[in-house]
Image (cartoon, coloured by chain):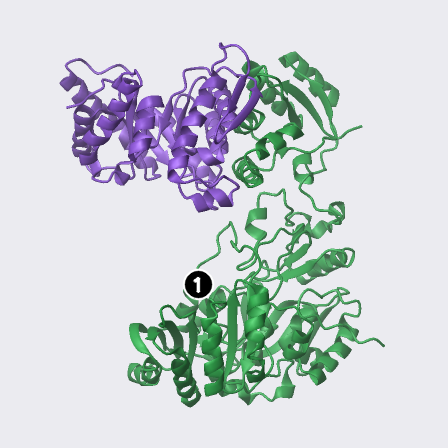
Amino acid sequence: MADEWGIELSLAEPGTLAALAERAEAGGLDVVVLKDEDNGLDPWTTAAWLAGRTESIQIAIPRETGETHKKVSPAMAEKALDSLALLAGTRLITTALDAEIAPATTLDDVDRLIEKAGDRDRSRRPAAVRALRRDGIDYDDIPASLRKTAIEPGDPGYRGVRSTYLRGGSPGLVLRPANPAEVADALSFARRHRHVPLGIRSAGHGVSGRSTNDGGLVIDVSAMNEITVLDEHQRLVRIGPGATWKQVAAALDEHGWALGSGDYGGVGVGGLATAGGIGLLSRQHGLTIDRLRAVELTTADGTHVRASAQENPDLFWAVRGAGANFGVATAFEFEVEETDKVGWAQLVLVSPDIEQTLVEFGEVARAADRDTTVFLVTGPPRQGQSVVQLYGLVDNPDPEIVVERLTPFAQTGLLAQQQVVLTSYAQVMAEAADVGPNGHHGRGEPVTRSAFLPVLTPEFAQDAARLLRTGQVYFFQLRHMGGAIADTPAGETAFTHRTPEFQVTAMGGDRAALNNAWDRLAHHFDGLYLSFETDTRPERLTDAFPPPVLERLRGLKNDYDPTNLFRDNFNVKPREI
Amino acid sequence: MTDYGHDLLFGSFVTPGAQDPRKAVDLAITADKAGLDLVTFQDHPYQPGFLDTWTLLSYAAARTQRIRLSGNVLSLPLRPPAVLARAAASLDVLSGGRIELGLGAGAFWDGIAAMGGRRLSPGQGVDALAEGIGIIRDLWDVDARGRVDHDGEYYTVKGAKRGPRPAHDIGIWIGAYKKRMLALTGALGDGWLPSMDYLPKGPDSLPEMNARIDEAATEAGRQPSDVRRLMNFMRAGEDSDQWAEYLAGLALDHGISAFIVGGDDHATTERLAAEVAPAVRELVARERGRTAPAT
């Protein structure tokens, strides 16, 4: 027998619609089917109106109505469906029904059906929710521990988890484990679903990391966001992968501490702390991964492992740069630094000669003290003029020193705007906007390239200026490296590019055009930072991990993820034995 | 001095925000309970942060008891007239005659095209609106014989069935600013629905724009008073008494008889109903030399 029961109402009988639907809902029926009639009411309008008169009963409209609606346009039809789901929940059914339906014209008709339906199993999700499920995912098999928090496309919270900061997505299921045991459950589900994409998400800011997808699984670890001080004296702090760097900075600031991350507080801990972390404090304190003392992760087979210099040191090496290939990190332990006020600068320069500005910026950045980190962002020149944004941090509380450090940077173009404040690192991170209940609003796919630039030469500046003039790059960034980043020997972590002067990122709109323009600069570069690279051509893997590093990673992949479950980005394939 | 003698209506102008979808509905409920005459919703479907206005309007109609509802104004290029006619008549039936049809020729053509609508020049948009209004009225006219056929420049309707029969005479209120649109409003509209903030010279534009509508109405063999003059205000006046005087002036001097106020704010909605509307009604009634109509 069908497990849903409903009444069919004629759209030619407007007077009784509401009363019959309300009675059906009160009596526990599952669905009201609207039957289209000549001269009858418009099905869509009536469905939306009935959704307003009732609270939870599903409303089915004839499939052809979908077609009528598409007369407007598919985009408008989709907008209408989305809007009704936002207003009234996922209650509209436009697909074929597997339900016991009886026509009703009187309250007695409805009551008879209510009686006939009787008590029945209500454990299945409503048909309107099931209709939005994606092929290839066994929704009945979701582990019990995750069922309550999982979000599927028909759930009210779906809008808040589908997309990421720069990427539009429509995953078939988002699992939200809150502890390592639940991560293991999520991974066992993922092992049974190798035929659909798998993304791991901390805060969903990733440019390169595919933490959403179309029709696949996402394991979202944002619930694991605890920040605990382990040892006040050693400044040892344990941080969950789901915290954002803004939260981390605020929590550490209470102790007078800081831990360098990237340059944006909205980024999640898990994604960044398994890749590198080239940020505003890196020249002073090293990469984020350089402050890592231990990490815990759940590997592909559900085993919980701890890695540090003493325990599983090979894995500890691999996680620091290639972590996404080895497991889902569930906790990080960092040794953080004491901090004082910092100088935070945001300058806007105008440059009539971007090539010259880049050369001068390179010279100034090269000569800068370790406490000073300045990033450069520009776009295509307009009428020969480039607008250059410089933003950076001087890790020194003395305003005179802050000004002294920044002055040479401000002179690399014509200073148009400046804002320099003495503040805390936590305040700098706090500038990131909070992500509300509706989640990120990314659309499409970001088109980016990344590279490490060993030396900013005049030849590079010339080629970079040419690249900018192509108009294919709307965002061009130089991240100032050097300083403490190079203090760690290259062999210490799987992130091996320790000595470049800069990390360079370009964002464009057209992948082929960007690749074409960018590839011409290849001879200036040595490797890339995987967090900012979205090109998926196979040679990018050796740009991220030079051959000896890749070999070692393959061997470890063989040990920790022999079936290659973690495969969505910069995939290190297991070495075949 | 122009006063077309219509009873006065007061309403709210609500943003159909999708971020907090219940907010727009709650504002409609507040307006309903406060005793306003109208709640209206902007329609910009290409704006990703907005709900579909027709869906919202249908849902809000079900959640309110007595207030009249309208798009302000619906974008005709994204709402084909035959579909819209049936939808509006249906909702009028379901809501007990509480629906009015605010219509515009379309603006933001990039957005319209992105949502699958046809890109037209502003001039073509006016012609398409005139065609659309004809189709809508034909489909509502269930007493006429035969099906509706329309083979136009912009819309084609073949053998469409008339109906359903609207529960009341739905007013078509047109958002118009430019000369041809004003003339169309005078010839075909039941109402004129612009926003004060977009009038080129504010209230000083009214004599000229009203005259344009009046002239077109007369040319079409109608009375100028066949076209109600409505007006949106993006913000409420701060002082209720001063604001009431200003609005009463617009009613008496320029024939504005519906005052629709934005701001998306419950307190403003309540103040409009409780303080401003009675004061304007009283001032206008006194000037018109008769007592305020019972509400």
Q: Which of A452 and A459 is in front in this view?
A: A459
Instruction: Tell me residue B61's x, y (percent).
Output: 46, 26
Instruction: Tell me residue A378's x, y (percent).
Output: 42, 71
Q: In which quarter of the image is the N terminus of chain A?
A: top right
Q: Is residue A490 above or below residue A332?
A: below
Q: Which of A313 and A100 is in front in this view?
A: A100
The answer to whether residue A273 is seen in the rendering is yes
Q: Which chain is purple?
A: B
Left or right position of B18 against B11: right
Left or right position of B221 against B27: left
Q: In this view, does A471 lie above or below B154?
A: below
Q: How many labels does the image show?
A: 1
Q: In this view, does A387 lie above or below A17?
A: below
Instruction: Tell me residue A239's x, y (percent).
Output: 56, 69
Q: In this view, does A24 lie above or below A334?
A: above
Q: What element carries label 1?
A: loop
Look at the image and give the colour of chain A.
Answer: green
Q: In which quarter of the image is the C terminus of chain A?
A: bottom right
The subunit letter for the residue under badge 1 reads: A
Instruction: Tell me residue A65's x, y (percent).
Output: 62, 29
Quarter-wise, where is residue A23 in the image?
top right
Say which residue label 1 marks. Answer: A432
Q: Nearer the viewer, residue B208 or B204?
A: B208
Which residue is located at x 68 percent, y 51 percent? A215
